[in-house]
Amino acid sequence: MRADRIDAAPVVAHVRQLMALRPDMPVAAIARQAGIAASSLKTLLHDTQEDPGRSREVAAAAGKRLLAVAAEDLPRQKRGYGGRSTDATPALHHVQQLLASHSGLSHASVARTAQVSPSTLAAALHDVAAGRPRRIQEAAAQRLLALGSPARVPEPTHRRDTTDPAPVIAHIQRLQARYDRASLALVARAGGVNHSTLVSALADHAHNPSRRINAEVAEKILALTELPPPAFLRQSHVTDIGLVRRLRALCTAGWTLKHIAKAGDTTVKSLGQLLSSGISTPVIRGAVLAAWTLHAHHSGPSDVTRRRSVAKGWDPPMAWDEQDIDDLDSTPQGTRRPGHPERWTPQVLRCELTFLTRLGLSPSQALVRLGLSTQRAQQLLTSPDTAPCVTTPRDVGTGNSLAA
C-alpha cells in the first residue's frame, strides 16, 4: 500500500455510522464537512456496497478528514449551509397578497426591500404557486413577512424607459423553439442582460399584464438572432439511437467521455446513462450533437478509449452517413459488424484496412477490429486479386499502399 493511501474499510464504516446516527443528513453534507467532493464519497460507498468483499484504498488525507467528522459536527436538522431554513409557503403567500394589493409593486422592489435575490424570490413564488415544497432561510422569511407594515412597504419602481414586454416574450419563445438547451439564463447571458433582472421582469408581467420591461433590456434581447453553445439548433429528425451511435463513434475515434462532456457542456455521468439506457433528454441531446459537430471529423487523443471502443464493436464516425445515422434500420458502411461474417477477398480486405487505418488504427488494431489473424490476412493479401480497391468519398488513400 502506498504511503499516501490507507485502507478504505474503517473510513466507510465510520461514514455509515454517521449516516445511521443522522438519518436526516445527506451524504453531501458529510462530504462537505470533511472538505471532500460529494461524488467521491458517494462512489466509494456505492462501490463497497456493490462488491463488499473487495479491498479498497482511499487517499490518506481524505480518509483522515472523514474519520475526524463527528455526528455533532454536522449541521442540525432543518439547517442548511446558509442558515436555519423554514417552510417558504406562509411568507410567499404574504408576498402574493402584497403584490395583489399594491399594483405598483414589482417582484424586484419586494426582493430588494427584503434583501432577497430577485431570481430566488421569483423561483420560490413559482414553486409555491405550483404546489411544490419550498424552503428558504428563516431570516429571509421573517423579512418577507414583515413587509406591509407602515415602515416596510416597498417603494414602487417608476421607470420612464420601459416598453411592452410581449414582443420580448414572443422572441424568447421563438429562440427556445429553434434551439435545444436555450434556457432563460443562456438567453440572458447571450444578450448581455442580468439573468435575475430578466426573470423578475417576466414574473412581474405574468403577475400583472400591465407591467412593462426596461427598454434597454428589451432591445438587447430582441437583437439576438443566434444563440452560442451549449445551445444547439433543434433537429427534429435526430433519434435516441442516432445519439447513441454518435456517442459510440466519438469514443471509437479516440474521444473520452470526459472530452465529449466538456465539448457538450454536460457530465460524464449523463453520457454514461445515455449509453446504458438508450434514452436521451433535451440537455443530453444538445450536448451530444454539439460534441459531434466539434469532434466527429478529428481524431481524439486517447488510444485506450479507441482500443476499448473498437473491441466492443462500435462503429467509427465515418461509418455513418448523416442522413442514415438516425435511421433504426440503417447499418454502418465500410466496416464489418460482429456476428455478420462475409466472404473475405483481397480487394475487400484492402478497402477495409484503408478505411480503418485512415481513422488512426494501426494495422494490428485494424485486424482485431475485423476479426482476422495476421496469418489469415497475409494469405489474403498475397492471393491473386484482379479487382482493384474502389475507394468511396469516405476512403482516402489506396489499398495497395496498405498491402505493402
Image (cartoon, rainbow, N blue to C red):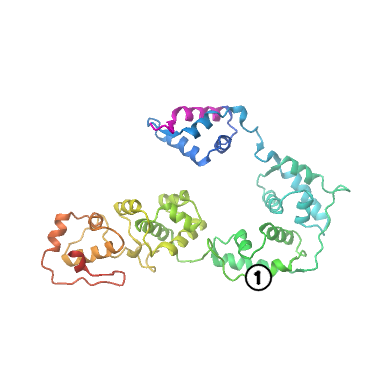
Can residue 359 be seen? yes
Query: Which stretch appears magenta?
Result: 1-20
Magenta region includes residue 274 = no
For badge 1, the amino acid type reads Leu
Residue 274 seen in the current view: no
What residue is shown at x 73% (from left), y 62% (from top)?
A: 205
* Residue that carries the numbered disc 1 in the rendered image: 222
Estimate the x, y position of residue 199 in percent, counting from the top left: 68, 58
* Principal secondary structure, stretch drawn in magenta: helix
Q: Is residue 325 above or below residue 306?
A: below
The quarter of the picture where the N terminus appears is: top left
Q: Is residue 125 above or below residue 77?
A: below
In the depicted structure, whether residue 197 falls above or below residue 140: below
Q: Residue at x 82, y 63 (%)?
A: 158
Q: Give the answer, above or below, for where 374 lies relative to 324.
A: above
Q: Residue at x 67, y 52 (%)?
A: 123
Residue 211 in the figure: left or right of residue 324: right
